[in-house]
Amino acid sequence: MSLKQEGVPKVAPEDQIESECGAKIETLFKVQPPLEKLKSGFGYLGVILRDTVSDKIQCHICGKWFKLLSTHLNQAHGISSRAYKFRFGLPLGFPLCGISFSKRMSDWSRKRFSDPVFREKQRLWLKRIIKFSYKKASRVKTAWYAKNSAAWLNKHAICKEQVLRRYLILADNLGREPSNHDIHRHEPGLHKAIRRHWSNFNCFKTANGFSTRLPAPVYSDDQLLASLRKFAREHGRMPMAADFTGHLSSGLPCYQTIRAHFGSWNRAMQAAGFYAH
């Protein structure tokens, strides 16, 4: 952070602080001089002040000194360490404690986790915790499911009225009746609720008076051949594949259905008697 101003002599941050505070205080986070003093608060922006005698650091909010500042922030000011660092321009990875306290905690953690006896105790402790948590969760989960399955209830799920209301809200946002694809895209949780209450999307639309898509017609081989012969009689010419494709095939079986039944269009024409075998 550069706070350089014109006409201000370049001095070390410690020299500026000593001249203003009159105490032996050092900065834990170096910034280029001149330092910017806080207008509302104590200390300087982007700087943590540490008393070299007591190894305490100063709180920017109240001005008091603590060896462990993070606990004071949470209890006295109700602010997290991360929010405090953002507010006063401090590096996020910097610990809010004195150097001796930080070194003591690091040495203790390093020694503790390098001790094989401690690692074995930690492993057994975690094993007991996991075993206890699993048993407790199993009892709670089993009782919860048994209670709600008996009455077919689910306290954490939405009811039928809520499902219908969310469906209508989605319809208003889209300007039309949502399709199954729209629900998957915009309301994935709503699709699961619909299947839980109505088994499928069409049953939901039928039960609530919405229009449903008609099922695709099923044709036999004889019906497909009869449709080819009927087309030839009505139009006075041999049917072509384009006649059974797209909007031209309204009321007629589509080209893909005929090809799926007979393997190809030419084989269907041969079976209908239009091509010589």
Image (cartoon, rainbow, N blue to C red):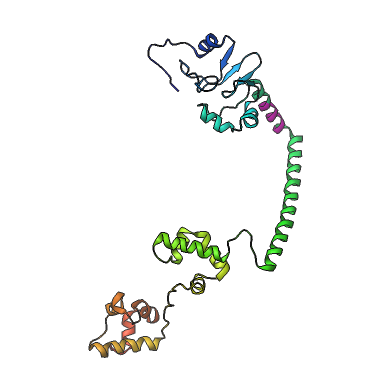
Q: Nearer the viewer, residue 3 or 160?
A: 160
**53 left or right, relative to 211:** right
The verdict on residue 110 being magenta is yes
Which residue occupies 53% across, 11% down? Answer: 20
- Magenta region: 105-113
Give how far across and how far down residue 242 sits, in percent: 27, 77
Q: Position of residue 218 (x, y in %)?
A: 43, 82
* Quarter of the rendering occupied by the C terminus: bottom left
Quick one: quadrant of the N terminus? Answer: top left
Q: Is residue 261 left or right of residue 247?
A: right
Residue 44 is a magenta residue: no
Residue drawn at point x = 69 percent, y = 62 percent: 145
User: Quick check: 25 above or below 270?
Assistant: above
Instruction: Give the image location of residue 55, x and y in percent.
Output: 64, 17
What is the total number of numbered labels drawn onto the structure image? Answer: 0
Quarter-of-image position of residue 265: bottom left
